Image (cartoon, rainbow, N blue to C red):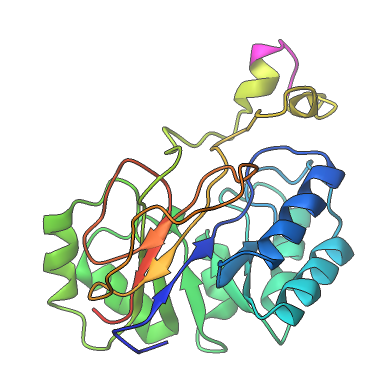
Amino acid sequence: MNDTNSTRLSLGPLQFHWPKSDMQRLYRQVADSQIDIVYLGETVCSKRREFRHQDWIDTAEQLIAAGKSVVFSTYALVEAQSELGYIRRLCENGELLVEANDMSAVQMLAGKVPFVGGPTLNIFNQRALQKLVDLGLQRWVVPVEMTRAMLAQIRDHISAPIEVELPAWGRLPLAYSARCYTARAHRVSKDDCETVASTIRTAFCWRPAKMRTSWSSTASRPCRPALPACYPSWKIVRDSPTYSASVRRRAALI
Protein backbone atom coordinates (compact mmCIF):
# COMPACT_ATOMS: atom_id res chain seq x y z
CA MET A 1 0.00 0.00 0.00
CA ASN A 2 2.85 2.38 0.72
CA ASP A 3 5.21 1.28 -2.03
CA THR A 4 5.75 4.38 -4.14
CA ASN A 5 6.87 2.21 -7.07
CA SER A 6 3.71 0.09 -7.13
CA THR A 7 1.01 0.54 -9.73
CA ARG A 8 -2.58 -0.55 -9.16
CA LEU A 9 -5.78 -0.33 -11.14
CA SER A 10 -9.09 0.06 -9.34
CA LEU A 11 -12.67 -0.25 -10.59
CA GLY A 12 -15.20 2.11 -9.05
CA PRO A 13 -18.78 1.17 -8.14
CA LEU A 14 -21.13 0.53 -11.03
CA GLN A 15 -23.52 3.47 -11.23
CA PHE A 16 -25.60 2.57 -14.25
CA HIS A 17 -28.81 0.62 -13.67
CA TRP A 18 -27.83 -2.66 -15.31
CA PRO A 19 -29.71 -6.00 -15.21
CA LYS A 20 -28.40 -8.51 -12.69
CA SER A 21 -27.08 -10.81 -15.42
CA ASP A 22 -24.99 -7.98 -16.90
CA MET A 23 -23.61 -7.07 -13.47
CA GLN A 24 -22.64 -10.68 -12.83
CA ARG A 25 -20.95 -10.89 -16.22
CA LEU A 26 -19.06 -7.67 -15.55
CA TYR A 27 -17.62 -8.87 -12.26
CA ARG A 28 -16.72 -12.27 -13.73
CA GLN A 29 -14.64 -10.44 -16.32
CA VAL A 30 -13.19 -8.19 -13.64
CA ALA A 31 -12.07 -11.29 -11.72
CA ASP A 32 -10.00 -12.32 -14.75
CA SER A 33 -8.67 -8.81 -15.49
CA GLN A 34 -5.61 -6.83 -14.43
CA ILE A 35 -7.70 -4.78 -11.97
CA ASP A 36 -6.36 -4.87 -8.41
CA ILE A 37 -9.02 -3.02 -6.38
CA VAL A 38 -12.79 -3.30 -6.88
CA TYR A 39 -15.39 -1.02 -5.31
CA LEU A 40 -18.77 -2.72 -4.87
CA GLY A 41 -22.19 -1.45 -3.87
CA GLU A 42 -25.08 0.78 -4.84
CA THR A 43 -24.11 4.45 -4.55
CA VAL A 44 -26.87 6.14 -6.53
CA CYS A 45 -30.40 5.03 -5.64
CA SER A 46 -31.62 2.71 -2.88
CA LYS A 47 -34.57 1.63 -5.05
CA ARG A 48 -32.21 -0.09 -7.47
CA ARG A 49 -31.98 -3.61 -6.09
CA GLU A 50 -30.84 -5.79 -8.95
CA PHE A 51 -28.15 -6.93 -6.51
CA ARG A 52 -29.28 -7.70 -2.98
CA HIS A 53 -26.90 -7.47 -0.04
CA GLN A 54 -26.05 -11.16 -0.26
CA ASP A 55 -25.27 -10.78 -3.97
CA TRP A 56 -22.69 -8.12 -3.11
CA ILE A 57 -21.23 -10.38 -0.43
CA ASP A 58 -21.02 -13.31 -2.85
CA THR A 59 -19.42 -11.11 -5.50
CA ALA A 60 -16.90 -9.79 -2.98
CA GLU A 61 -15.93 -13.35 -2.00
CA GLN A 62 -15.46 -14.33 -5.65
CA LEU A 63 -13.27 -11.31 -6.32
CA ILE A 64 -11.20 -11.87 -3.17
CA ALA A 65 -10.69 -15.49 -4.25
CA ALA A 66 -9.38 -14.10 -7.57
CA GLY A 67 -6.83 -11.98 -5.68
CA LYS A 68 -8.66 -8.64 -5.77
CA SER A 69 -8.88 -6.12 -2.96
CA VAL A 70 -12.56 -5.29 -2.39
CA VAL A 71 -14.09 -2.10 -0.95
CA PHE A 72 -17.78 -1.53 -0.16
CA SER A 73 -19.14 1.85 -1.31
CA THR A 74 -21.99 3.70 0.41
CA TYR A 75 -24.76 5.95 -0.93
CA ALA A 76 -23.76 9.41 -2.09
CA LEU A 77 -27.00 11.00 -0.91
CA VAL A 78 -28.90 9.67 2.11
CA GLU A 79 -32.59 10.52 2.53
CA ALA A 80 -34.19 7.82 4.68
CA GLN A 81 -33.66 5.85 7.87
CA SER A 82 -33.65 2.64 5.84
CA GLU A 83 -30.69 3.95 3.87
CA LEU A 84 -28.87 4.81 7.09
CA GLY A 85 -29.53 1.30 8.30
CA TYR A 86 -27.98 -0.20 5.19
CA ILE A 87 -24.95 2.07 5.46
CA ARG A 88 -24.51 0.94 9.08
CA ARG A 89 -24.66 -2.67 7.90
CA LEU A 90 -21.84 -2.03 5.44
CA CYS A 91 -19.75 -0.11 7.97
CA GLU A 92 -20.07 -2.93 10.49
CA ASN A 93 -19.15 -5.71 8.04
CA GLY A 94 -15.99 -6.39 10.08
CA GLU A 95 -13.82 -7.48 7.16
CA LEU A 96 -13.74 -5.17 4.16
CA LEU A 97 -12.73 -1.54 3.78
CA VAL A 98 -15.61 0.90 3.25
CA GLU A 99 -15.72 3.95 0.95
CA ALA A 100 -17.69 6.65 2.79
CA ASN A 101 -19.53 8.84 0.27
CA ASP A 102 -21.56 10.71 2.89
CA MET A 103 -20.71 12.12 6.31
CA SER A 104 -23.16 9.74 7.97
CA ALA A 105 -20.88 6.88 6.90
CA VAL A 106 -17.84 8.79 8.18
CA GLN A 107 -19.56 9.17 11.56
CA MET A 108 -20.13 5.41 11.73
CA LEU A 109 -16.53 4.59 10.79
CA ALA A 110 -14.59 7.36 12.55
CA GLY A 111 -12.22 6.15 15.23
CA LYS A 112 -13.25 2.52 14.72
CA VAL A 113 -11.75 1.27 11.45
CA PRO A 114 -9.76 2.80 8.57
CA PHE A 115 -11.89 3.97 5.65
CA VAL A 116 -11.80 5.48 2.16
CA GLY A 117 -13.08 9.03 1.72
CA GLY A 118 -15.24 9.04 -1.41
CA PRO A 119 -15.40 11.86 -4.00
CA THR A 120 -18.77 13.12 -2.74
CA LEU A 121 -17.38 14.15 0.65
CA ASN A 122 -16.27 17.33 -1.14
CA ILE A 123 -12.92 17.82 0.58
CA PHE A 124 -11.25 20.92 -0.85
CA ASN A 125 -8.74 22.07 1.77
CA GLN A 126 -6.03 20.60 3.97
CA ARG A 127 -7.85 21.24 7.26
CA ALA A 128 -10.87 19.21 6.19
CA LEU A 129 -8.67 16.42 4.88
CA GLN A 130 -6.48 16.41 7.99
CA LYS A 131 -9.58 16.15 10.18
CA LEU A 132 -10.71 13.05 8.32
CA VAL A 133 -7.19 11.59 8.39
CA ASP A 134 -7.28 11.99 12.18
CA LEU A 135 -10.60 10.11 12.19
CA GLY A 136 -9.16 7.18 10.23
CA LEU A 137 -9.18 8.07 6.53
CA GLN A 138 -6.44 6.11 4.75
CA ARG A 139 -7.36 6.74 1.10
CA TRP A 140 -8.87 9.86 -0.40
CA VAL A 141 -10.81 9.96 -3.67
CA VAL A 142 -10.33 13.47 -5.00
CA PRO A 143 -13.44 15.41 -6.16
CA VAL A 144 -13.63 15.79 -9.93
CA GLU A 145 -13.41 19.59 -9.61
CA MET A 146 -10.05 19.45 -7.84
CA THR A 147 -7.21 21.10 -9.78
CA ARG A 148 -3.61 19.98 -9.78
CA ALA A 149 -2.52 23.18 -8.00
CA MET A 150 -5.12 22.69 -5.26
CA LEU A 151 -4.06 19.08 -4.77
CA ALA A 152 -0.39 20.03 -4.53
CA GLN A 153 -1.16 22.64 -1.88
CA ILE A 154 -3.22 20.20 0.17
CA ARG A 155 -0.57 17.50 -0.18
CA ASP A 156 2.11 19.73 1.27
CA HIS A 157 0.15 20.29 4.48
CA ILE A 158 -0.94 16.75 5.41
CA SER A 159 0.92 15.35 8.40
CA ALA A 160 0.57 11.64 7.55
CA PRO A 161 0.99 9.77 4.25
CA ILE A 162 -2.29 8.66 2.68
CA GLU A 163 -3.36 7.11 -0.60
CA VAL A 164 -4.95 9.36 -3.20
CA GLU A 165 -7.25 8.47 -6.09
CA LEU A 166 -7.81 10.91 -8.93
CA PRO A 167 -10.29 11.03 -11.83
CA ALA A 168 -8.53 10.10 -15.05
CA TRP A 169 -10.94 8.75 -17.67
CA GLY A 170 -14.68 8.26 -18.07
CA ARG A 171 -17.94 10.16 -17.56
CA LEU A 172 -17.84 12.93 -14.99
CA PRO A 173 -20.86 13.77 -12.82
CA LEU A 174 -22.39 17.19 -13.46
CA ALA A 175 -24.61 17.40 -10.39
CA TYR A 176 -26.29 15.50 -7.55
CA SER A 177 -29.97 15.79 -6.82
CA ALA A 178 -32.50 14.29 -4.45
CA ARG A 179 -34.90 14.38 -7.40
CA CYS A 180 -34.32 11.57 -9.91
CA TYR A 181 -33.70 13.09 -13.33
CA THR A 182 -34.74 9.90 -15.13
CA ALA A 183 -38.07 9.81 -13.27
CA ARG A 184 -38.64 13.48 -13.99
CA ALA A 185 -37.93 12.97 -17.69
CA HIS A 186 -40.65 10.31 -17.69
CA ARG A 187 -43.04 12.62 -15.80
CA VAL A 188 -43.35 10.37 -12.74
CA SER A 189 -42.47 11.05 -9.11
CA LYS A 190 -39.37 9.53 -7.58
CA ASP A 191 -41.44 7.67 -4.98
CA ASP A 192 -43.67 6.26 -7.71
CA CYS A 193 -41.07 5.72 -10.40
CA GLU A 194 -41.27 1.90 -10.43
CA THR A 195 -37.52 2.04 -11.25
CA VAL A 196 -38.20 3.55 -14.66
CA ALA A 197 -34.43 3.85 -15.05
CA SER A 198 -34.34 0.09 -15.66
CA THR A 199 -35.92 0.69 -19.07
CA ILE A 200 -32.80 2.60 -20.16
CA ARG A 201 -29.59 0.60 -20.12
CA THR A 202 -27.43 3.65 -19.42
CA ALA A 203 -29.89 5.53 -17.20
CA PHE A 204 -28.66 7.01 -13.94
CA CYS A 205 -30.22 9.05 -11.20
CA TRP A 206 -27.36 11.25 -10.00
CA ARG A 207 -24.19 10.25 -11.76
CA PRO A 208 -22.90 7.80 -14.40
CA ALA A 209 -20.93 4.62 -13.88
CA LYS A 210 -17.23 4.85 -13.23
CA MET A 211 -14.17 2.77 -13.12
CA ARG A 212 -10.96 3.53 -11.30
CA THR A 213 -7.30 2.86 -11.48
CA SER A 214 -4.62 3.00 -8.81
CA TRP A 215 -0.92 3.51 -9.23
CA SER A 216 1.91 5.55 -7.81
CA SER A 217 3.01 8.88 -9.23
CA THR A 218 6.48 7.50 -9.95
CA ALA A 219 5.31 4.44 -11.85
CA SER A 220 5.82 4.21 -15.59
CA ARG A 221 2.71 2.75 -17.17
CA PRO A 222 0.24 3.49 -20.00
CA CYS A 223 -2.64 5.74 -19.00
CA ARG A 224 -5.25 3.47 -20.59
CA PRO A 225 -4.86 -0.22 -19.71
CA ALA A 226 -6.54 -2.74 -22.00
CA LEU A 227 -9.95 -3.52 -20.49
CA PRO A 228 -13.00 -5.49 -21.67
CA ALA A 229 -15.44 -3.49 -23.76
CA CYS A 230 -18.25 -3.96 -21.23
CA TYR A 231 -16.60 -1.66 -18.68
CA PRO A 232 -18.52 1.60 -18.14
CA SER A 233 -15.40 3.66 -17.47
CA TRP A 234 -12.31 3.44 -15.33
CA LYS A 235 -10.24 5.42 -12.88
CA ILE A 236 -6.57 5.88 -12.23
CA VAL A 237 -5.02 7.05 -8.99
CA ARG A 238 -2.18 9.40 -9.52
CA ASP A 239 -0.46 12.53 -8.37
CA SER A 240 -1.20 14.53 -11.50
CA PRO A 241 -4.84 14.22 -12.59
CA THR A 242 -6.13 13.97 -16.13
CA TYR A 243 -9.71 15.13 -16.31
CA SER A 244 -10.68 13.39 -19.53
CA ALA A 245 -12.20 10.64 -17.43
CA SER A 246 -13.44 9.16 -14.22
CA VAL A 247 -10.78 6.71 -13.28
CA ARG A 248 -9.06 6.68 -9.94
CA ARG A 249 -5.42 6.50 -9.72
CA ARG A 250 -3.64 6.11 -6.40
CA ALA A 251 -0.53 8.05 -5.51
CA ALA A 252 0.95 5.79 -2.85
CA LEU A 253 2.03 8.70 -0.68
CA ILE A 254 1.22 12.38 -0.50
Dividing the image into 4 quarters, which one contains the C terminus?
Answer: bottom left
Question: Residue drawn at (73%, 72%), measured in percent from left and top?
Answer: 63
Q: Residue at point 37% right, 71% down? A: 215
Left or right? Give the position of 230 relative to 110: right
Point out the stretch of residues depicted in magenta: 185-189
Q: Position of residue 10 (x, y in %)?
A: 51, 65
Q: Main secondary structure of the magenta part?
A: loop
Residue 204 on image: x %, y %: 63, 32
Question: Going by the image, does 183 lie left or right of 238?
Answer: right
- Is residue 73 at least partly visible in the picture? no
Q: Is residue 51 magenta?
A: no
Q: Nearer the viewer, residue 91 or 18?
A: 18
Q: Is residue 226 above or below residue 33?
A: above
Tell me the residue at 27%/70% (across/down): 220
In this rendering, does residue 223 appear at all? yes
Q: Position of residue 80 (x, y in %)?
A: 71, 49
